[in-house]
Amino acid sequence: VRARLVVIGGGFGGATAARFLKRAMPSASVTLIEPNADYYACPFSNLVIAGMRDLSKQRFGYDALKAEGIDIVPDAAVDVDPVARTVSVKSGDTLPYDKLVLSPGIDFRWGAIEGYDKAAADLMPHAWKAGPQTVLLRKQLEAMEDGGLVVISVPPAPFRCPPGPYERASLIAHYLKTHKPKSRLLILDAQDKFSKQPLFEQAWSDLYPDVIERYGANEFGRVVSVAPASGILSTEFEDIRADVANVIPPQQAGAIAHKAGVADMTGWCPIDPLSFSSTLQPDIHVIGDATIASPMPKSAFSANLQAKLCALQITAILSGQAPEPTTLTNTCYSYLSDDTAVSITGVYTNADGTLQSVPGSGGLSPLMAEDIIRHNEALQARTWFHTITGQTFG
Ligand code: FAD
């Protein structure tokens, strides 16, 4: 019998899963459901916001997947019936599956910050899904007078790309320093500690000492409400008027994960890390940002690797074999300026049924480093972007 494999979401996780399923099982029917013809990659989108890169370099499509025999359904999945094993799409069609892979990414918890709803994002962009929001934030920064105040509001963990807000702050600070030197950037943070903190803080004091200021949750930095029309962000104790406000809202798994019954009370999807199968529904696997896969971060690197592992294990399961334990890894690069970057690497094992960091593995860029090391990491980041988008979209 020809296996029917359906993937929801054509981002870093889903597009990779579709390709690796098709390669592993050429005779299977592989269908990718994705409503958008163009995918805009988030990695490197902070460079676009800071005016160092064109948005067109972030755009990818599905022609290579089609050429490999993957059926693309240009529609949104609106429901999943885990008992009948079917997916319904917006147009009204129903697609049957033997195995379903969900990689819908994140949705925002609108209203979790009082006043921050979908309409507010037109005035105070999140730019946490790349595309028009990236352009909007860029335009606001360009339009701001020299001497203005930019505010970035960071949500509580877990959220997509843990070092992302701080890379963004670094790159916006670089733009301000070089184009609008009287301007300031304030980070209002719902976290106390953050990814690569010593590296970022060192770079901020070296490169942007008069530009960036940050208040963590322990310093009452958490934003509790906003008034988008007047540019006000409020913490528990203070109202701050921003000239440009970038509100990165609290997050959860994409809506279809909730519809499919694979998300739990946390808003995210518990998985068995051996194959990324849902622990809540049979024959459904979840990968990427939507999962609970800590200590793996919610990154494109993780989503891509989880997709490959998931495809391999679905192939094994369908041929009657049990999934084998393995190790996984992740590297996240963050730019500090237009041509310097740092990185963090983790190595994980799923051997005992949970994901664990392998003791003594992984690591961070050195704190004391010659410029050449930071430059080299910026070059490595570019190679990484080229490789991962090539693997994902062709
Ligand atoms: P996504 O890539 O978001 O893909 C989800 C897809 O599912 C989308 O195409 C969406 O249209 C589709 N979808 C959703 N719902 C449905 C539905 N109902 N029906 C059909 N399709 C649906 N990661 C790194 O590794 N390195 C970096 O340097 C990095 N930098 C980042 C910088 C920023 C500013 C941000 C915001 C993120 C960054 N990331 C980075 C994180 C990375 O973008 C995400 O972790 C990654 O995109 C997750 O992949 P995913 O497949 O889970 O979700």
Image (tube, rainbow, N blue to C red):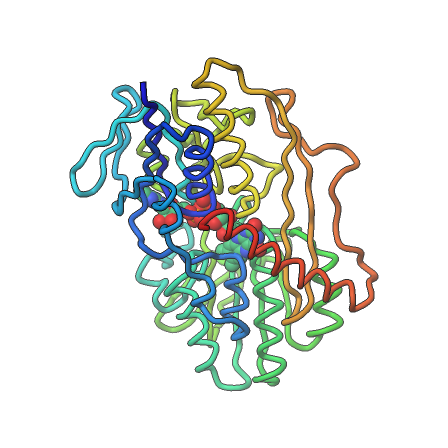
Q: Is residue 307 left or right of residue 116?
A: right
Q: Is residue 290 above or below residue 349?
A: below
Residue 183, picture quadrant: bottom right
**Up-down relation of residue 6 to residue 322 (above or below):** below
Residue 224 screen position, x and y as percent: 47, 56
Q: Quadrant of residue 143?
A: bottom left
Q: Nearer the viewer, residue 109 or 196?
A: 196
The spot of residue 151 in percent (x, y) is: 52, 69
Of all residues shown, which one is farthest toward the top? 320
Query: 179 above or below 258?
Result: below
The residue depicted at 46 percent of the width and 24 percent of the height is 315
Residue 251 shows in this picture: no
Q: Quadrant of the N terminus?
A: top left
Residue at left offset 38%, top offset 73%: 230
Furthest toward the left, the residue is 92
User: Does any portion of residue 6 appear in the rendered image?
Assistant: yes
Task: Look at 31% across and 53% down and name the residue there.
Answer: 36
